[in-house]
Amino acid sequence: MKTFLLTVAACGLLLTGTAKEPLYRDPTAPLAERVDDLLSRMILREKLGQLSQPLYRSDDTTLDARITRGEVGSLVVAHGSALAPAERDRLQRIAVERSRLGIPVLFGFDVIHGYRTLFPIPLGIAASWNPELAEASARIAASEASACGIDLTFSPMVDVARDPRWGRISEGSGEDVLLNAVFGAALVRGYQGDDPSKQGRIGACVKHFVGYGAALGGRDYQFTELSERALRETYLPPFKACVDAGAVSVMSAFNDISGTPASANALTLDRILRKEWGFDGFVLSDWKAVTELQEHGIAADGAEAAVKALTAGVDMEMTSDLYLTTLEQSVREKRLPAALVDRAVRAVLRVKFRLGLFDRPFRSHPEPDRMLLTPEARRTARQLAAESMVLLKNDGVLPLSPDLRSITVTGEWAVSRDLYGWWVGMGDGRDAVTVWDGIRSQAGRRTDVRLMSQSRSRRSDVAVVCVGENGYLFGENNNRSDIRLPYGQEQLIRELKEQGNKVVVVVFNGRPLDLSAVVPYADALLIAWHPGTEAGNAVADLLFGKRSPSGRLPVSFPKSVGQLPLFYSDRTSGRPGNDRYVSMDGQPLFPFGYGLGYTTFEYSELRLSKSVAAPGEQVAAEITVTNTGGMKAKETVQLYLHDKAASFTRPARMLIDFRKVELAPGESRTVSFDVTPRQLAVLDAAFRPVVEAGEFEISAGGTPSELHSRILTLKR
Ligand code: BGC
């Protein structure tokens, strides 16, 4: 009788159309109320479904039914497997129209340095020292990805990385804390804008939280030994900057941190990320990182791994299904408080509401192709690629004269389309401009430009030799114990020089390389990284002097693999200057911050608004830079700090700010920086930032060996 009455009532509502929409469907209701309302309607299985991110596979015959049951919170679209926008929307329709509560699925993909239009690899983007341009690249990547139905990217990667043997050094902004923070935040802003639910925006998942870049010996997935001070001084600040920029998600890393894996780490995930920083988005584990807690040796079985990860603060599980398959029982048996499941589900739902998925679940563009590779995207890709390239040596051969009689273009990368690096999004090599095409289109009409594929004997005015490492020699788990140029390329360079050519070496690389055997034979040496779609045009712009190179190294280039790890901001020892080996010093071949251009810049002395100040008082540092050469060019003014005596030892030099400016010949610009208490602060014994009295050396300039310094004294 009761059933009958309910059925009659339900039919009545349907017929009269007076059924009230649940609160969570009301776009005008406050977000927290929508989350609470929806959560109150969910059964435990549906909740665990929201915490699952299986891998999308086009041949998965169980997926439709699983989505209908409400057991898919998100899907990860893997590297190389396309999810057509129409198929994405079909799956979304199942979630929204056929699952009991109609919760939309979140589609995640690695949009790392572009979707269809490829920008330089992230290490190259950082070498531009141009965060505005990095932001523009992420905005374009988001608009292309969103037009194709992607809601979330697993980017930026802000792992400070100081060992070039580690293949993933290519995916972040290099060795410096500030560069990782600034570029990470710029990418988050580019993807998400000020409101990630807007058309053309996607959510950002910052990774890999935390310490992943410190993998022992540069071997991927190895454990890390990081004190809380090291975490807080070096590895955490870039994540904090991204969280402050509004990143909706954070990915927990594969590595162990001094005995507790990052994906079961309550200190980093709960105490620091959630409680100290107030992060209220969701934490996604890296690929099977929850299951791998068993291999780490902190969980006897999958059920224990799931409880440990969720309790520590991993809200959603990527690709393994332990939450869905084990946590119901763990809750029933009181091994996991149900409130912790709710905490995780709230985080996931908050992000889905924040991204506007409930209100606009179908977001692919009706004609996605129209949104890809637009002229604006190509223009930005070309500019960013050119600004990312770093000129390390030039004896005057560059820029190439339009009157050259002959140029030989050679080396594997002359015609290669392997220019996108490790993550390629939905990039298509056929879109790429090769170096050969770029050079041919810009060479002077009188110049004979030839491609030398076989014979090595040809002599010409200039040989442009394109060398490097391919996209499978760097990236995830592509670590190298030898970081010289592979495949006999050093020999090719030597031979070309010995044949009497002027040799311009262009290197396509994903990490700092040991180029000591190349430098003596190169008349010019240009680091091009893997530059993306507009590679060849960008290289040609620089070689022919359409633009002056303006990239600066975001990472030190060593003289030998034996020096690693090697970075500029190490702490001084009690015996400064003694960092050496029996047969080699401890200095890099090319230091962090280094890079040449086609003009000269002169700097004034550095001026401080006060040389004595009270701790907490604002101080300005000012320096005037003049373009004293003959070409318009960009220069990056770098600002460094050395704290002479503090309660704890600090780096000998730390980058605290920078500004990229463009100057016409003869033009001067005064660049002014605020030296803030935050920059001066040291972490005390309880890791609180405190500004201490004492002397601070502030230095500024365009190249690390020629900085202008002043002492700032803080007095109580
Ligand atoms: C990588 C992540 C990536 C994920 C999804 C993992 O193997 O470590 O960086 O986002 O796969 O493709």
Image: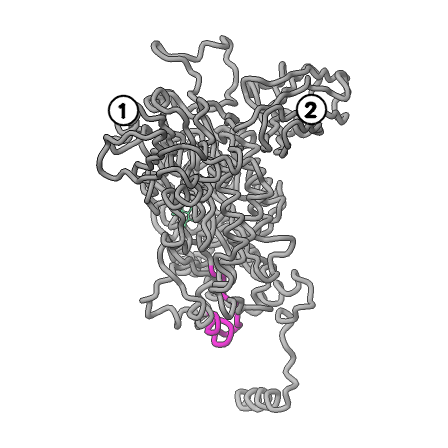
- Name the residue tied to disc 2: 624
Q: Is residue 596 above or below residue 158?
A: above
| Quadrant in the picture for the C terminus | top right
Identity of the residue drawn at 42% across and 41% down: 445
- Mark 2: few, some, or many residues within 10 Å (few <14, many ≥20)? some
Question: Which amino acid does the dot numbered 1 rest on?
Answer: Gln
Viewer-proximal residue among 44 and 255: 255
Identity of the residue drawn at 63% across and 87% down: 17
Q: Is residue 553 left or right of residue 559?
A: right
Which of the 4 image quarters holds residue 618? top right
Q: Position of residue 663 (x, y in %)?
A: 64, 32
Mark 2 or mark 1: whose residue is earlier in sequence: 1
Helix, strand or loop at label 2? It is: strand
- Name the residue tied to disc 1: 499
Q: Position of residue 491 (x, y in %)?
A: 26, 27
Helix, strand or loop at label 1? It is: loop
Q: Is residue 700 left or right of residue 370?
A: right
Magenta stretch, residue numbers: 92-107
C-alpha separation, residue under disc 2 versus residue under disc 1 = 45 Å
Q: Position of residue 314 (x, y in %)?
A: 48, 49
The residue at label 2 has a CB less than 8 Å from ligand 1: no
Question: Which amino acid does the dot numbered 2 rest on?
Answer: Thr
Q: Is residue 702 above or below residue 7?
A: above
Which of the 4 image quarters holds residue 212? top left
Viewer-proximal residue among 356 and 399: 399
The residue at label 1 has a CB less than 8 Å from ligand 1: no
